[in-house]
Image: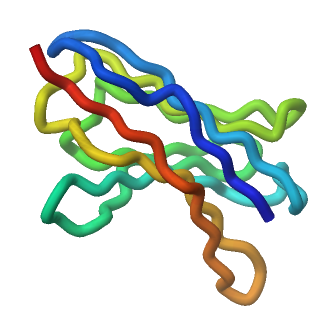
């Protein structure tokens, strides 16, 4: 199982970024996916989740209306479109999947920095 994030970077407040997570090694279309983030000195928290097939999504309150999670089953990729970014969105963003028997897998993370 491999999860590889990309798309992070430095952006000014109010800007946008799109994170990608390319998945391999498991039946991607059968599993829901999540994005987490971890700011310096803080715990890793879930940001957004999407069901297998993409029919249902959930977001933490602080990103509702600004972030959108989506999947492309043909590309085995999950995305996180982030708009109206704020300095408090600065964190390392991680892709996550939980496979059968509760086995968790994480990507290596991608840094997002929101600063002027």
Task: Indicate whether 100 appears above or below 116.
Answer: below
The residue at 58%/64% (across/down) is 106
In the rendered image, the quadrant that contains the N terminus is bottom right
Residue appearing at x 20%, y 25% in the figure: 114
Residue 41 quadrant: bottom left
Q: Position of residue 34 (x, y in %)?
A: 53, 54
Query: x%, y% of residue 51?
Result: 64, 52
Q: Split into 4 quadrants, where in the image is the C terminus?
A: top left
Residue 116 vs 72, above or below: the answer is above
- Residue nearer the viewer, 50 or 15: 15
Q: Nearer the viewer, residue 82 or 30?
A: 82
Which residue is depicted at the point 31% across and 62% down? 45
Q: Position of residue 10 (x, y in %)?
A: 30, 21
* Residue at the far bottom in the pictured view: 101
Q: Is residue 57 left or right of residue 62?
A: right
Residue 49 in the image: above or below residue 19 = below
Dividing the picture into quarters, in which one does residue 115 lie?
Answer: top left
Q: Is residue 108 left or right of residue 75?
A: left
Residue 76 percent coordinates (x, y): 81, 40
């Amino acid at each position: 199982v491999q999860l590889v994030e990309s798309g992070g970077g430095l952006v000014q407040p109010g800007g946008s970024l799109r994170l990608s997570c390319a998945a391999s090694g498991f039946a991607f279309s059968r599993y829901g996916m999540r994005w987490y983030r971890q700011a310096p000195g803080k715990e890793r928290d879930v940001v957004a989740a999407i069901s297998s097939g993409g029919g249902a999504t959930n977001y933490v309150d602080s990103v509702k209306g600004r972030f959108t999670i989506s999947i492309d089953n043909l590309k085995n990729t999950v995305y996180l479109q982030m708009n109206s970014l704020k300095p408090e969105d600065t964190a390392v963003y991680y892709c996550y999947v939980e496979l059968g028997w509760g086995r968790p897998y994480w990507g290596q993370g991608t840094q997002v920095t929101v600063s002027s």
